[in-house]
Image (cartoon, grey):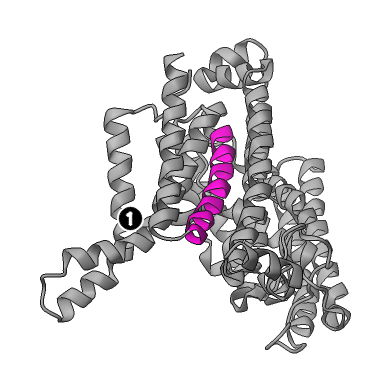
Amino acid sequence: MAHSYRNLLLFAAVGLLFILTGIFQSWNLSLQILNIGILSAIMALGVNMQWGYAGLFSTGVVGSVALGGLAVVVVSAPPVPEAFAAGGWTVLGGLVLGVAVIVAATLLYRSMKPGRARGLAVAAVVVMGFFLYRYVFDSGVAAVEAFNPATYGNIGGFGLPSLLAWPVGALFAGIAAWVIGKIALGLRSDYLAIATLGIAEIVVVVLKSEDWLARGVKNITGLPRPWPVPLEVDLQADAGFVDFVTRWGWEPIGASTILVKLLYMALFGTVLLVLIWGSERALNSPWGRMMRAIRDNEIAASAMGKNVTKRHLQVFIIGSAVVGLAGAMLTSMEGQLVPGVYSPLRFTFLIWVMVIVGGSGNNWGSVLGGLLLGWLWLAVEYLGPNLMGYITAALPPGDLKTHLIDSAQHMRLVTLGVVLLLVLRFAPRGLIPEK
């Protein structure tokens, strides 16, 4: 019972941070940070499934987030019929041809006896298939990217509602996790971390480089919002809404932005609660006990007849799918896909810090860590310059004072490190440790 009260106090303290931010800064900023914190908590839940449940040390979180964002473009972006007609089918044909080459090489490798002949045959199929694939694929890409590159230069999406992109984002990340798991889950934990980090960076580089897919570094903007979230300008043009808020003495522009963020909070909070409910049931089920047994002693679990590799692959896919879901939700909220923001610092290591600070192996701990570190990461960026302004108030105007104030937003890195060190020193199992 004492632990329950302590956990409630911890969540209340984090809630107080958001309330104080609203009082002393603005409620608009507080709600913005809260929505990012909820999405971070969902990502932390996904990482906790991999590490806290099964002991899988994956550093490819950013790749799953990016694939979730790509799903929003594929599902919700308006189609570009002219670009697709110019080379879309050729691009798809090239991709199918590339998959066919891989399948053919795999089947040939399995059907032939080991030896020099098998190696030469597989190499010949791969080399010839690669050049054929590049010939078909590159011609289609050139045709697509040549169509009005300043505005389009990509094949677009299906123009479907943004909510449908969320499960598709989970699906994209889950499929990628299956491929990665088949390749890397047999590796030792340190090699697994290196492999997943490298593959995640490949995913991000592909998003930045392939203009035909999502315009690369030109970015995709104007993505539709999920139902029932409206545009602020539509609310401000609605006579009923304007009349209602002015009657209460609120300013229409500020009220519209706050209402939009409240709707996002309701959507994201609902998804988070559903995931917590499912995670808690899974963790306390026979499946969850089996996963913890595999995490604690793989040899003993294998001796009891458990397929360790299969279960590792299973939880790796589930955790990645949850992260991909959060990545799709984030892109829907921002209304744009900007591949340049997908950095390992923000979407891998910060999420790991959330899991460690909150308490790995505990779902509620991951949520607490996501909300706390989500607030800290963004609040310090806004509060840092003000704090540095007070600290440097006595300094005369000059380069030193300007440099300190301009660098204040980077205080969040120092603050993050201090919080992590304090937690590891005084609560090494996290703020809400696993029972």
155 is higher (above) or lower (below) than 433: below
The residue range painted magenta reads 27-50
Number of numbered discs overlaid on the protein picture: 1
Residue 28 inside the magenta-drawn segment: yes
> Secondary structure of the magenta portion, mostly?
helix
Residue 288 inside the magenta-drawn segment: no
Q: Residue at x 71, y 52 (%)?
A: 169
Badge 1 element: helix
Q: Which residue is mark 1?
A: 413
Toward which corner of the image does residue 225 lie, by quadrant? bottom right
Give coordinates of residue 422: x percent, y percent: 27, 37
46 is higher (above) or lower (below) than 379: above
**How crowded is the residue under tag 1: few (<14 C-alpha within 10 Å), some, or many (20+)?**
some
Q: Nearer the viewer, residue 100 or 387?
A: 387
Work out whether residue 347 can be spotted.
yes
Q: Nearer the viewer, residue 225 or 68?
A: 225
Give coordinates of residue 184: x percent, y percent: 59, 41
Q: Is residue 412 left or right of residue 46?
A: left
252 is higher (above) or lower (below) than 51: below
Toward which corner of the image does residue 289 lie, by quadrant? top right
Query: In the image as oriented, which residue stretches furthest toward the front?
Result: 247
Q: Nearer the viewer, residue 408 or 314?
A: 408
Q: Residue at x 58, y 33 (%)?
A: 49
Give coordinates of residue 146: x percent, y percent: 75, 88
Give coordinates of residue 242: x percent, y percent: 68, 70
Going by the numbered disc 1, the residue's amino acid type is Leu
Work out whether residue 206 can be spotted.
no
Q: Is residue 99 left or right of residue 364?
A: right
Q: Residue at x 72, y 41 (%)?
A: 114
208 is higher (above) or lower (below) than 299: below
